[in-house]
Amino acid sequence: MWEVKSIKIKAFAKVNLGLRILEKRDDGYHNIESILQTISLFDELNISLAAESIVVTANNPELPLDETNLCYKAADILLKRTGQKRGVIINIKKNIPIGAGLGGGSSDAASVLTGLNLLLSLSLNKEELRKIAVSIGSDVPFFIDGGTAFVSGRGEKIEPINKKIRFNYLIVFPGFSIDTKWAYEKINFLTKRENYITIFNCYFNDSNSGNLELLLKNDFEEVMLGEYVELKKVRRFLIQNGAVSVSLSGSGSSIFGIFDDIMKMDNALSFFAGKGYWAKEAFSIRSSEIPQFALE
């Protein structure tokens, strides 16, 4: 019988369509509420089976390749919990900026779980994969399905949103990373209960970007825009170049603009490229479009 020995898989980025930071938990995390949306920007992973050990390689020298790497953690935990005596080689082609609030590391880890589940014919269902994912990182469970979802707790409680959301995004990375743990330590306020995001207050359809001013409120913005003048500049440039709404993604450092005019978005992309920024156009990816992979 033909044995599949490797898989190529796309690990999609996400943006936060709003983020509220609630009370600090006993475990040191904060409870949050957010709407997460996968977008068409992705890392590329090549996962191969080996006789022994876990090896991670990457095209980005800033990425750790040891057991602190989330892909390494994902492979290690999955192999141990399923009793597999195999090795794994993981090559990561990073297209998603590191420390940008776009969930690249978490998405990569989820893709390793999904990929190894297929390669090793483990037949784990998505709920079983999510239970493993939560031990790797708060955002990792979301990426098992991706799409659009309301998340709460520390990010592990996921409620899919099945309405068709097809926004056009211009993602701008200012050239520096923001450490998530440091960002939470800088937060000196909590969202008031009456201002919490609820998915019932958010309206979406294919022809209307909805009540974005209500939705795109990120509690990190006040702090991060105060810390980094460059973020204020990027936000202002996006608005000046036609974005209908602008927000920080996660704790940053990426800022995205939503555009309802593709020509304006193309022009804005040229504007940022001319100023030397990393900028990419993207659109929403639905859960039905995930995973995208090729077996070899």
Image (cartoon, rainbow, N blue to C red):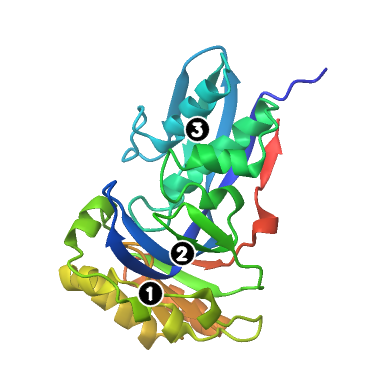
Q: From the image, tell me which residue sits under label 1.
A: 247
Q: Nearer the viewer, mark 3 or mark 2?
A: 2
Mark earlier in primary sequence (2, 1): 2
* Residue 176 position in % (x across, y down): 26, 57
* Residue under the image location 25 percent in, 76 percent down: 232
Residue 45 can be seen in this image: no
Residue 99 left/right relative to 82: left
Sort mark 2 into few (<14), some (14-19) or many (20+) by Cα contacts within 10 Å.
many
Determine the secondary structure under disc 1: strand
Q: Quadrant of the C terminus?
A: top right
User: Comparing marks 1 and 3, which lies closer to the viewer?
Assistant: 1
The residue located at (43%, 35%) in the rendering is: 58
- Numbered circle sitting on residue 91: 3
Q: Position of residue 108 (x, y in %)?
A: 49, 43
| Distance between the alpha carbons at the discs numbered 2 and 1 | 9 Å
Q: Which residue is mark 2?
A: 15
Q: Where is residue 98? Give x, y as percent.
A: 35, 50
| For marks 1 and 3 on the same chain, the one whose residue lies earlier in the sequence | 3
